[in-house]
Image (spheres, rainbow, N blue to C red):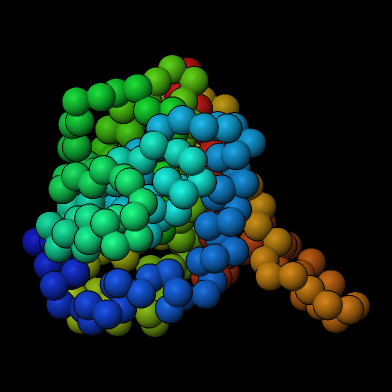
């Protein structure tokens, strides 16, 4: 799919939808809480490069958690919205228009890099991982929360591609592990997300089934959650 489609996506979708994210997608609250927990265990404070930041809500939430944040997105309109939100919410963060496949910022000493639900829009995702590696300090952490390989076959992904022309990829663990190794990352580990809380015996069984399916089958609702370091 064309890069121009990625750039124009933010101009075609409902603008109110972009400004309201993440409050119009409740599922991401739990997912992002896990992001904050993982970063908190590895980086008590520091600087984070938020790749594919979109309308900026991920960057702003990281900033509220105490991190110094730079958000990057290929879309001028997304960055415009992100900056507007930063001012309106009185939360400082820097935002830069850039393609994560070849982004080249002045600083290359970030403590962390985040790919939250964005790498699957990047056809040359291996290049994006290599660029993130270049912007990290030694010992810095990369954190990915990305779609599984089944995502590309989901009705939602197919409809989004048909309507807007954007890329909708999906990844196996093997793909991500290989790509991270090729980019120079070490100590690669996958985090299991047990899913929403359960109630009672039936809820417990559903949670167990979800974990098993996530590990063996990677059904569309599950996510690949990967942490690695720059050696």
x and y percent of residue 208 in the render? 79, 66
Query: Which residue sits furthest left?
Result: 4
Res. 2 in view = no
Residue drawn 58% across the image and 56% down it? 33
The image shows a total of numbered marks equal to 0
x and y percent of residue 129 in the render? 34, 37
Residue drawn 33% across the image and 46% down it? 92
Left or right: 159 with respect to 179? left
Left or right: 19 with respect to 170? left
Q: Quadrant of residue 126?
A: top left
x and y percent of residue 53 in the render? 31, 53
* Viewer-side residue, 26 vs 213: 26
Query: Which residue sits furthest right?
Result: 201
Image quarter (top left, top right, bottom left or bottom right) of the N terminus: bottom left
Residue drawn 18% across the image and 70% down it? 9
Q: Quadrant of residue 29?
A: bottom right
x and y percent of residue 192 in the render? 66, 52
Left or right: 58 with respect to 168? right
Res. 62 in view = yes
* Viewer-side residue, 159 vs 54: 54
């Amino acid at each position: 799919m064309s890069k121009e489609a990625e750039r124009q996506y933010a101009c075609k979708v409902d603008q109110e939808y972009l400004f309201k994210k993440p409050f119009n997608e409740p599922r991401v609250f739990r997912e992002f809480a896990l992001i904050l927990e993982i970063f908190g265990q590895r980086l008590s404070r520091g600087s984070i490069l938020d790749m594919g930041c979109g309308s900026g809500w991920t960057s702003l939430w990281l900033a509220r958690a105490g991190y110094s944040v730079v958000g990057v997105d290929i879309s001028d309109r997304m960055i415009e919205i992100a900056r507007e939100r930063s001012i309106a919410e009185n939360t400082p963060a820097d935002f830069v228009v850039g393609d994560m496949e070849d982004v080249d910022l002045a600083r290359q000493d970030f403590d962390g890099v985040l790919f939250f639900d964005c790498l699957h829009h990047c056809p040359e995702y291996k290049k994006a991982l290599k660029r993130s590696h270049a912007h990290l300090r030694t010992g810095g952490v990369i954190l990915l929360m990305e779609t599984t390989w089944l995502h590309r076959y989901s009705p939602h992904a197919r409809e989004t591609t048909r309507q807007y022309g954007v890329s909708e990829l999906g990844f196996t663990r093997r793909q991500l592990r290989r790509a991270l190794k090729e980019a120079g990352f070490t100590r690669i580990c996958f985090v299991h997300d047990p899913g929403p809380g359960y109630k009672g015996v039936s809820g417990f069984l559903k949670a167990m089934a979800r974990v098993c399916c996530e590990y063996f089958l990677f059904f569309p609702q599950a996510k690949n959650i990967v942490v690695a370091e720059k050696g």
